């Protein structure tokens, strides 16, 4: 069974002649422990698709299954419980609470589920290389360190699926590479990650790249045994065929 199945999903806004279709009959599946990037020009539907999968927004038609559960047919109370148990979130702007230390920000994810494990926090912090900043506040650490803290918070409950929206968008190239190495580490521990990004270099670390254009999946590109550099070149080639400025993707 696939961990994620998106079946014939459509999303539109407005009514009558003013209707705007953002996603048009989108279907794909994702296996456990896969790392997939979603790319495409601005307005192609990337963030909308991520919002639907995260249950932040609702589909106009179609179905989305996570671990066999159809999230399109559940009420908000059930979805809130489902998010806490199954989904982890990583954002471009980190979404850390400035009044809490790094450790307390990570603990917050555990407290939402009514769990607390000092050992698991220490172990994960060491795994991601942030064990020395656990008692610092967000305004005392770098952007890369903030994002690794956000990764720890997203993974501490070992969710079925981690959803990342432009996780390297606010970072320089050196910090971005550190974050990508952290994502690979999480994947080595069984994480399944779906990420929206504009950056071909970032996508080259993934197993697959889904290219959206005008609300449809225009291309599903697999890495297979390619190196990061080789896959990067294939992504750039695909982007040039897709059209538009590479910096817009």
Image: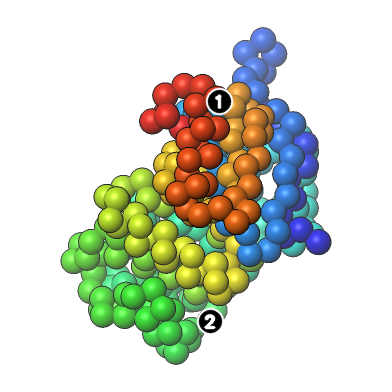
Residue 80 falls in which quadrant of the image? bottom right
Q: Is residue 145 above or below residue 157?
A: above
**Which residue: 50% across, 69% down?**
186
Give whichever of discs 2 and 1 has the lower sequence position: 2
Residue 174 falls in which quadrant of the image? bottom left
Residue pointed to by mark 1: 242
Residue 137, how many percent across, how many down?
23, 69
Residue found at the far bottom of this picture: 119
Which mark is on residue 115?
2
**Which residue: 29% across, 57% down?**
175
Locate the N terminus and report the quarter of the image it occupies. bottom right
Q: Is residue 29 above or below residue 103?
A: above
Badge 2: how crowded within 10 Å, few (<14), some, or many (20+)?
Answer: few
Q: Which label sits in the foreground, 2 or 1?
A: 1
The colour style of the image is rainbow
Is there any visible trace of residue 57 in the rendered image? no
Residue found at the far top of this picture: 17
Residue 51, how many percent across, how many down?
57, 44
Tell me the CA gap for discs 2 and 1.
Answer: 46 Å
Q: Is residue 1 above or below residue 104?
A: above
Q: Is residue 160 left or right of residue 236?
A: right
Which mark is on residue 146?
none
**Which residue: 26% across, 80% down?**
132
The one of 18 and 32 positioned closer to us in this rendering: 32
Count the marks.
Answer: 2
The one of 105 and 249 positioned closer to us in this rendering: 249
Q: Secondary structure at mark 1?
A: helix
Residue 45, how many percent across, how many down?
57, 32
């Amino acid at each position: 069974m696939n961990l994620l199945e998106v079946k014939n999903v459509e999303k539109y806004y407005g009514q009558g002649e003013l209707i705007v279709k953002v996603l048009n009959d989108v279907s794909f599946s994702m296996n456990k422990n896969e790392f997939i990037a979603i790319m495409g020009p601005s307005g192609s539907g990337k963030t909308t698709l991520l919002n639907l999968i995260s249950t932040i927004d609702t589909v106009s038609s179609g179905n989305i299954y996570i671990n066999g559960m159809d999230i399109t047919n559940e009420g908000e109370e059930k979805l809130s419980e489902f998010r806490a148990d199954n989904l982890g979130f990583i954002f471009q702007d980190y979404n850390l609470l400035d009044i809490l230390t790094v450790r307390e920000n990570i603990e917050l994810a555990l407290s939402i589920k009514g769990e607390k494990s000092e050992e698991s926090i220490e172990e994960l912090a060491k795994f991601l290389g942030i064990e020395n900043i656990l008692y610092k506040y967000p305004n005392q650490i770098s952007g890369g360190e903030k994002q690794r803290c956000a990764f720890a918070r997203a993974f501490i409950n070992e969710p079925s699926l981690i959803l990342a929206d432009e996780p390297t968008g606010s970072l320089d190239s050196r910090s971005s590479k550190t974050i990508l190495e952290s994502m690979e580490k999480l994947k080595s521990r069984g994480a399944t990650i779906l990420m929206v990004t504009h950056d071909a270099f970032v996508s080259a670390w993934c197993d697959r790249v889904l290219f959206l254009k005008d609300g449809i999946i225009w291309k599903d590109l697999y890495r297979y045994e390619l190196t990061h550099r080789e896959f990067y070149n294939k992504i750039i080639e695909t982007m040039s065929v897709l059209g538009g400025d590479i910096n817009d993707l």
